[in-house]
Amino acid sequence: MTHDSKAGLSRRTFLGAGAAAITLPVAMPAWAEARDPDALVLQDQVHRNISSFRALDWRPYFSSTAGGAILVDTTSRALHFWSADQTIYKLYPTSVPISEDLTRRGRTSVVRKVNGPTWSPTPAMKKRNPEWPDFVPAGPDNPLGTHALYLGWTYYRIHGTHDTRKIGRKSSNGCIGLYNEHIAELFGLVRNGAQVLLI
């Protein structure tokens, strides 16, 4: 077997293992299984948008990277992060809101960072899903995952998720979701006051 054949086999093995890891099912709390009707309708229509998942330059979106900069592209379902000194660039797959009316775009900033966030549904969520609990403590049943970056917009966050099926999909009620290992890494890089742009 040539070196190139071994490299190709290694790449195929790696990609196959990665695909398997992404699609592993995750047990969800009983209250979360009663899904929003919009989510059920969209579930069959959603597909992963891999073609536009690519590295971007910060300059078309920010005048500087002072304080750090986060760009969330809701079309490609990707989050881009640039450190203030531009020595660190990260690109993560995300979940995005399930419908246009739940999607917010524009400029804001990170106002608070929480390790082990708790969660309460918004009044609009509770109206759509009255069976949901009023409060979920930090832990494996929490829809915010292990870490959360609270934004300047009320109820909007960039956070982790224990349900890995959501990443790469239109699956949230307005927030931007990342794999728990990715939000943990981003959490360590981002400071309060970092610029955030959703497009």
Image (cartoon, rainbow, N blue to C red):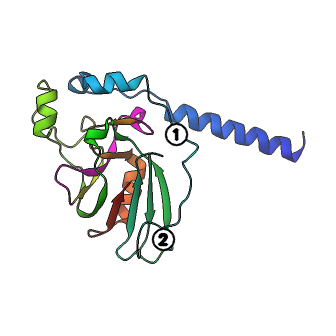
Residue 97 locus on image (x, y percent): 32, 40
Say if 144 sits above or below 87 in the image: above
Say which amino acid is labelled 1: Asn
SS of the residue under disc 1: loop
Which of these two is toward me, 19 or 140? 19
Disc number placed over residue 16 in the picture, else none: none
Residue 67 locus on image (x, y percent): 34, 74
Q: Is residue 131 left or right of residue 51?
A: left
How many numbered marks have been drawn onto this rendered protein structure? 2
Identify residue for label 2: 59
| Residue 196 position by quadrant | bottom left
Residue 80 locus on image (x, y percent): 45, 58
Q: Which residues are magenta?
A: 152-169
Say which amino acid is labelled 2: Arg
Give the alpha-carbon distance from disc 1 to disc 2, as whole Å.
23 Å
Residue at the image point whose x is 40% and y is 54% from the top: 72
Residue at the image point whose x is 55% and y is 58% from the top: 55
Which of these two is toward me, 144 or 39? 39
Identify residue for label 1: 49
Q: Is residue 63 left or right of residue 118?
A: right
SS of the residue under disc 2: loop
The quadrant in which the C terminus is found is: bottom left
Say if 127 sits above or below 143 in the image: above
Say if 188 sits above or below 168 in the image: below
Residue at the image point whose x is 26% and y is 41% from the top: 102
Residue 42 locus on image (x, y percent): 37, 26
